[in-house]
């Protein structure tokens, strides 16, 4: 698994995951699963949904023409 989440995306997912898990105490299992997924994907830096749709928020400097070494 390659990392496909940028730092800002991981932080945002972690915050939303904590908020969703805290709401799950009163709301029930669906919110718990969503919050757990957000926290685990932020910890690993990999999102299976992003991989399925080939979305990547992680900026790769090697593919940029401005940062390539010649």
Image: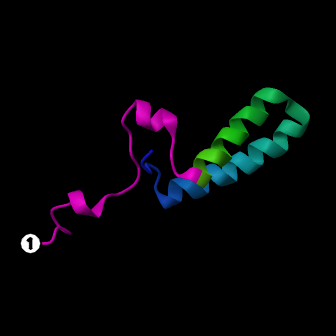
Residue at 44 percent of width and 51 percent of height: 3
Q: Residue furthest front?
A: 1
Count of labels in the image: 1
Q: Is residue 17 above or below residue 49?
A: below
Residue 28 placement (x, y as % from top left)? 85, 29
Colouring = rainbow
Q: Residue furthest right?
A: 26
Q: Is residue 13 above or below residue 48?
A: below
Q: Residue under label 1, please give it.
A: 70
Residue 11 placement (x, y as % from top left)? 59, 58
Locate the N terminus by quadrant: top left
Residue at 52 percent of width and 59 percent of height: 8
Which of these two is toward me, 31 or 62?
Answer: 62
Is residue 12 toward the left or the right of residue 17 in the image? Answer: left
Q: Is residue 39 above or below residue 52?
A: below
Q: Is residue 48 above or below residue 4?
A: above
Q: Residue furthest left?
A: 70
Is residue 61 toward the left or the right of residue 25 in the image? Answer: left
Is residue 16 toward the left or the right of residue 46 in the image? Answer: right
- Element at label 1: loop
Residue 16 placement (x, y as % from top left)? 68, 48
Which of these two is toward me, 51 or 15?
Answer: 51
- Crowd class of label 1 (few under 14; some 14 to 19; many from 20; radius 10 Å): few
- Report if residue 62 lies within the magenta region: yes
Magenta portion: prevailing SS class: loop
- Report if residue 2 lies within the magenta region: no
Locate the C terminus by quadrant: bottom left
Residue at 51 percent of width and 41 percent of height: 47
Residue 20 picture quarter: top right
Range covered by the magenta-colored residues: 44-70
Residue 4 placement (x, y as % from top left)? 43, 48
Residue at 76 percent of width and 33 percent of height: 31
């Amino acid at each position: 698994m390659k990392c496909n989440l940028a730092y800002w995306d991981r932080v945002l997912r972690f915050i939303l995951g904590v908020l969703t898990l805290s709401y799950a105490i009163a709301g029930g299992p669906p919110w718990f699963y969503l919050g757990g997924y957000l926290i685990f994907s932020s910890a690993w830096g990999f999102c299976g949904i992003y991989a399925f749709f080939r979305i990547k928020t992680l900026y790769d400097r090697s593919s940029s023409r401005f940062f390539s070494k010649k």
